[in-house]
Image (cartoon, rainbow, N blue to C red):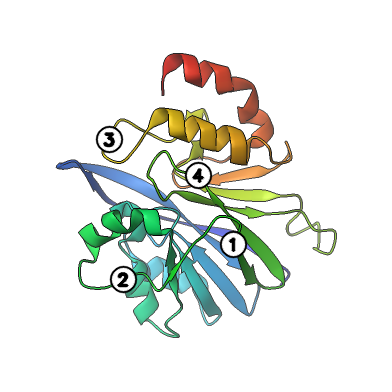
Amino acid sequence: MPLDIALVTTRGIFSIDDEDFEVENNVWLVGDDHEVVVIDAAHDAEPIAAAVGDRKLTAIVCTHGHNDHINAAVDLQSRGGRPPILLHPADEMLWDLVYPDRRPDAPLVHGGELSVAGATLRTLHTPGHSPGGICLYLPASSDRDPTVLSGSHVFGGDTLFRGGPGATGRSFSDFPTIIESIRRELLSLPPATVVHPGHGPGTSIAEESPHLAEWVARGH
């Protein structure tokens, strides 16, 4: 098949500041019949591995280091091929809470590119929810089959959701920083860009951009 985006949802516990919360996470897969990238291997490697199938898993991307976005990454990696686990270095202190005895395999850097199935995903550093939060941007391409995947897409992690920015007010988070990240890196994307968040329903840049001032006024 041509390039496609698939969603797997998993449930588990998000732990922060000595509190636990039951959450449902979105795990995104981008690829074709032959190879695929997994974005945010959360909670349970089994359904993610089933969605990968017999395709080559070329990378496991962590949009940030909170446990609910990385806690199935090493298990998924161990199931074959040893694809690299990628994380922005500014979130390694969060990674260490889950995996104190090993490191991510390679760093994500702002502007860095990741290729899969003939497409290029570009890393956007979007701190605020956490210092090393990133989004992955997939530009529109006229070469793709429009019946399968068209337009531009951004995988927003916990930076941007339907209705506003990711949560702040916890350790290592900062509201003014996430607002600036969204303003600079995300609201500058084409308005029709589809936003695929780390939790909950999707949205678009066009839907969210008119509300920036409201978010700033309410403070979250």
Q: Residues within 10 Å of mark 4 (few under 14, many from 20)?
A: many
Determine contact: label 1, label 3, CB under 8 Å.
no
Q: Which type of secondary structure does the marked residue at label 4 adopt?
A: loop
- Quadrant of the rendering where the C terminus is positioned: top left
Q: Residue furthest left?
A: 18
Q: Residues within 10 Å of mark 1 (few under 14, many from 20)?
A: some
The disc placed on residue 112 is: 1
- Quadrant of the rendering where the N terminus is positioned: bottom right
Q: Which type of secondary structure does the marked residue at label 3 adopt?
A: loop
Who's the residue at 27% across and 35% down the image?
170
Residue 152 position, x and y percent, is 72, 50
Who's the residue at 27% across and 55% down the image?
93
| Quadrant housing residue 120 | bottom right
Compared with 179, 107 (above or below) is below
Determine contact: label 3, label 4, CB under 8 Å.
no
Residue type at mark 2 is Arg
Say which residue label 4 marks: 126
Cα separation between marks 3 and 2 = 24 Å
Determine contact: label 2, label 1, CB under 8 Å.
no
Residue depth check, mark 1 versus mark 3: number of the one nearer the observer? 1
Circle nearer the N terminus (3, 2): 2
Cα separation between marks 2 and 1 = 20 Å
Say which residue label 2 marks: 103
Who's the residue at 59% across and 21% down the image?
211
Residue 216 position, x and y percent, is 49, 19
Who's the residue at 46% across and 41% down the image?
200
Compared with 104, 206 (above or below) is above
Q: Residues within 10 Å of mark 3 (few under 14, many from 20)?
A: few
Circle nearer the N terminus (3, 4): 4
Residue type at mark 4 is Thr
Q: Residue furthest bottom?
A: 81
| Residue toward you, 198 or 121 | 121
